[in-house]
Image (spheres, rainbow, N blue to C red):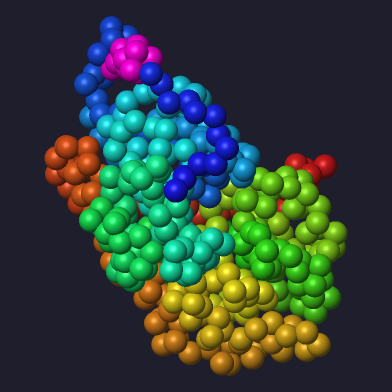
Amino acid sequence: MTLVHGEQDTTPTNGERAATTAAWSNNGPWETLRDRKEVLVVAQTMVYAKRLHDFYALLASDLRIHVQFTVAPHTFNGGTAEVLRALGGTVLPWEQAVRHEFDLVLAAGSQGIEQLHGPVVRLPHGAGNIKLSRRTGPDGERAAIGLGPDYLYWEGRLVPAAFALAHEEELFELRRSCPEALPIAEVVGDPCYDRIAAALPHRERYRAALGLRPEEKLVLVSSTWGDGSLFTRLDAVLPRLTTELPRHGYRAVLLAHPNIAARHSAYAVHSWAKATARGAVTVIPPETDWRPLLVAADFVIGDHGSVTLYGAMTGAPVLLAEYPHRHVNPRSPAAQLAGTAPALAPGHPLTGQLAYAAEQYRPEDYAAIAARISSEPGRFDRNARRLLYRVLGLGQPAHTPDPQPLPLPEPLDAIAAAESRRAG
């Protein structure tokens, strides 16, 4: 079983590790704060970097802890280092990170973590364990991505010291696919769930920040990446927003998974969307926090991605434009959403379909789906902080962690203008 495929072995010798540890000692004369716990945040992709933020933010105010970052080798790591550097943090070269001993390693992906030294805490990188691995196990079953032995073991060794999960249902998935990891698994909740839930009562503030008029309807088009994503049907979906939605009553935005831009470039994503929508859809940059936009949305047109699933929390009717049944975990909340939300149909006016989705919307059905995202609603911060400090061997700060509210977004007109300038 492997976590990284085809990467050069950069594991240091004992002599190299000792020399590097000495060079990295936080007891040197140049240090202002000494004897700190060293934490490494490993971001394989931009999505993982953004997902990890709600975890390492729980450590940010503690002077006993020093948080640094690195970008592990990954096909989709384009733009990840820039996102981390924008935080003002230290981004270690990967070759340096694998030669240092850390007190805690935080990761949302598996690639490269077996090369690092220190207790690893693994986290899910999305909601609901939606996608199935393309590999079949010895029993002929396909594990949910992230929960199988391929994502947790390296040469017979269980790599993470702890595995933070969002929902108790994930323990059942883990028992099916990798029961050996159950002793290290702990349900802490979902940070995006908690942040979105806290923002929903302030929805009008987010809409005003986007520049939406009270009567305007925001249609959020969300695409995950890969085969079966909405993006593969972009030329069929976006023109309908252009030709069928009244310009004066609707605004439409496209949230494309950052992996698409990482593989094809942000320029290509913007160019394709601009060509198919003829400027009627605002393309959201991949580094943007998508959660405020989801809070502000009146309708969601999506696929089997996490953003569409989080849409079940918001009260916005959902239309599914694409859904690859064979690659979706049939036990996931995304599969339940696919059986609940209406599907975007060809040959019928889009405004009529949005009206139909609103008419057929049953809050209790979507609430049941949303409840499967987190079984610890509102308790992520305290649960996750307890886990991290236990691994660090430190007592927690003597206060309840304060959840940070979602930031107010930039106006859509400013986002569109900036994207146009960037795309040339």
* Left or right, residue 78 beside residue 206: right
Q: How many marks?
A: 0
> Residue 189: x, y in percent?
32, 62
Residue at 85% from the left image edge and 59% from the top image edge: 275
Q: Which residues are magenta?
A: 14-26
Of residues 423 and 251, which is closer to you in this image? 423
**Residue 386 spot, x, y in % from top left:** 21, 49
Q: Is residue 89 left or right of residue 38?
A: right
- Position above or below: 124 against 93: below
- Residue 196's spot in the image, x, y percent? 43, 64
Residue for point 65% across, 84% down: 343
Q: Would you place residue 212 above or below residue 183 in this image?
A: below
Q: Nearer the viewer, residue 285 or 303?
A: 303
Determine the residue located farthest toward the top in the rendered image: 29
Residue located 63% across and 66% down the image: 222
The image quadrant where one finds the C terminus is top right
Residue at point 36%, 23% (across, down): 100
Q: Is residue 111 magenta?
A: no
Q: Position of residue 53 (x, y in %)?
A: 42, 46
- Res 299 quadrant in image: bottom right
Residue 10 visible (yes or no): yes
Q: Nearer the viewer, residue 335 or 424?
A: 335
Residue at the far front in the pictured view: 138
Q: Where is 13 relative to 144, above or below?
A: above
Q: Main secondary structure of the magenta part?
A: helix
Residue 124 appears anywhere in the view: no
**Looking at the picture, does residue 97 appear above or below residue 318?**
above
Q: Nearer the viewer, residue 378 or 1?
A: 1
